[in-house]
Image (spheres, rainbow, N blue to C red):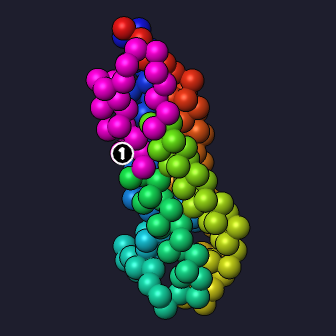
Amino acid sequence: MLILLAFIIVFHITSAALLFIATIDNAWWVGDNFSTDVWSMCFTNTSTCTAITDQFREYQSIQAVQAAMILSTIFCCVGFLVFILQLFRLKQGERFVLTSVIQLLSCLCVMIAASIYTDRHEELHKSSEYSPAVSRGQYGYSFILAWIAFAFTLISGVMYLVLRKRK
């Protein structure tokens, strides 16, 4: 039972770490001499970064991605705290339903963020505020980590729904 508990805790912490990295790191869209995310656009050859502000044409889409990723990270962290509390508060045989719901909300938020970015990336990177080189980029590892975090939070949400408290 302790091995299962340790696995669940490590799995949840891994999900949170993936969400933090995907939200913070500057690698949602990368190219040879630039990287961009939902916060800024950086050019590696000149070491300059430009914040993405409301001057960008598709700023509303970027704000939606920012909000969904932040909510997802918050839900995942709150879900972990609720799980720890439920370990001590639930009666034997009860399910971790509240933790499951919170994890599934985290899953939903990261899915929404990654889906919006997937759908709007052409409009985002072909706007005049970006340099022409940005439109020739590709998805970076932060974007891929966001989708992996989606899978992890989905699995852990279902796992908490099935899991019962034992002795």
State whether residue 158 is above or below residue 117. Answer: above
| Label 1 packing within 10 angstroms: few (<14), some (14-19), many (20+) | some
Q: Residue 80, position in %: x, y?
A: 36, 37
Please indicate whether residue 131 sits to the left or right of residue 9 in the image: right
Q: Nearer the viewer, residue 16 or 161?
A: 161
Can you see residue 141?
no
Please indicate whether residue 15 sits to the left or right of residue 138 in the image: left
State whether residue 95 is above or below residue 119. Answer: above
Q: Is residue 163 magenta?
A: no
State whether residue 156 is above or below residue 145. Answer: above
Give the residue drawn at x 46%, y 21%: 94
Q: Residue 50, position in %: x, y?
A: 41, 80
Span colored in magenta: 75-98
Give the residue drawn at x 40%, y 14%: 92
Q: Is residue 92 magenta?
A: yes
**Circle 1: element type:** helix
Q: Quadrant of the N terminus?
A: top left
Q: Quadrant of the C terminus?
A: top left
Q: Quadrant of residue 122?
A: bottom right
State whether residue 150 is above or below residue 40. Answer: above
Q: Which residue is mark 1?
A: 78
Q: Nearer the viewer, residue 9 or 34?
A: 9
Q: Residue furthest front?
A: 91
Q: Residue 128, position in %: x, y?
A: 60, 90
Q: Nearer the viewer, residue 92 or 115?
A: 92
Q: Quadrant of residue 3?
A: top left
Give the residue drawn at x 47%, y 88%: 54
Does the magenta stretch mainly form a helix, a strand or a loop? helix
Give the residue drawn at x 58%, y 88%: 57
Give, as a three-letter code, the residue at label 1: Val
Can you see residue 31?
yes
Q: Residue 153, position in %: x, y?
A: 53, 40
